[in-house]
Amino acid sequence: MSLVVEIFDPALPFQTYNLKSSGIDTWHDYSLITEKTRAKLKQVYEKGMRTLNLSGGMSIKVPLLEIGIKIGSIKIDKVEVLVVDKGNYEILLGSNVINKSFEIGKHEDNGASVTSKWKEDPTALSLELYPVNMPFDIYNFENFLCQKRKLYNILLLIGSEINIPEISHIDDFIDKDEGISLKFKLQLSWIDSGSIWVSLKSGSEKTLKRLGSLWW
C-alpha cells in the first residue's frame, strides 16, 4: 500500500514536508516518527514524555509532539506523535490518526465526511491564499476580502444586474453594499480550517465568474 503523507508545523500549515516512506499500525495508540523526520519540524516544541509499549512487554519513554499530517486529500491539523530513534518508516500512522480521519466533517445525524457541500459548491469562487511571510497579518487578509467585495460590486453594476436609483448613491453602493439585496451580496460561504481557503458566493454567477476571470 502506498500512502502520500506530508507533515507540517500546525503554526505553519502552508509549509509541508513530503515523506518518502509511511506505514500503518493501529496496535500503537500514537503515531510514530523517526528522529530524522522530527528534524524537519525544528520549531515544534516537545510536550513532554510518553510511554511507548514495545513487543515482549517492554516499554520506553520517548518525546511527544503535536504536528499536522496530510494524507492524500485528508488534512489533520493537530496529531500527537511519539519520536523514536529510527524505524522502517519515516512515519508510522497509529490508531489516533485513523480515528481523527473519521472525525473530520463529522455530523451527529449524517455520520462522517471529509468534504462539505459549501466547500465543493461548483457555483462558488474558491481562492487559496499563500502568504509571503508568516505569521500572516490578519489586516492584510481583511483588506483583501474588502477589496474583492468592492470590485465585485463594481462588476455587478457594470453587468446591469442591479440598478441604483441615483448616481450620487454609487459610493455607498460600492463601499457599503447599500441597495444590494442579500441574494446578490458577495458572501463568505466557506473558510477552511488550518489554511486560508475561502469560497465566495453570490446570487449572480455571471458577476462571480467575471471576478474570478481577473486572476485565472
Image: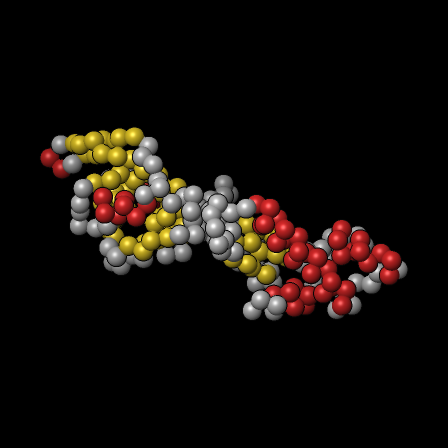
| Residue 148, quarter of picture | bottom right
Q: What residue is at 73 percent from the left and 60 percent from the top?
A: 153
Residue 172 location, x and y as percent? 80, 53
Percent across and percent down for residue 154 are: 74, 62
Residue shown at 26% from the left, 34% from the top: 63
Question: Which colour assignment does the render follow?
Answer: secondary structure
Q: Quadrant of the N terminus?
A: bottom left
Residue 140 in view: yes
Name the spot of residue 67 as percent of width and height, x first: 35, 42
Residue 111, visible in the rendered structure: no
Q: Position of residue 4 (x, y in %)?
A: 32, 57
Position of 28 compared to 160: left or right?
A: left
Quarter placement of the C terminus: bottom right
Q: Is residue 108 above or below residue 121?
A: above
Relative placement, left or right, of 179 versus 136 is: right
- Residue drawn where x is 64% and y is 65% of the image: 211
The residue shown at (31%, 35%) is 46
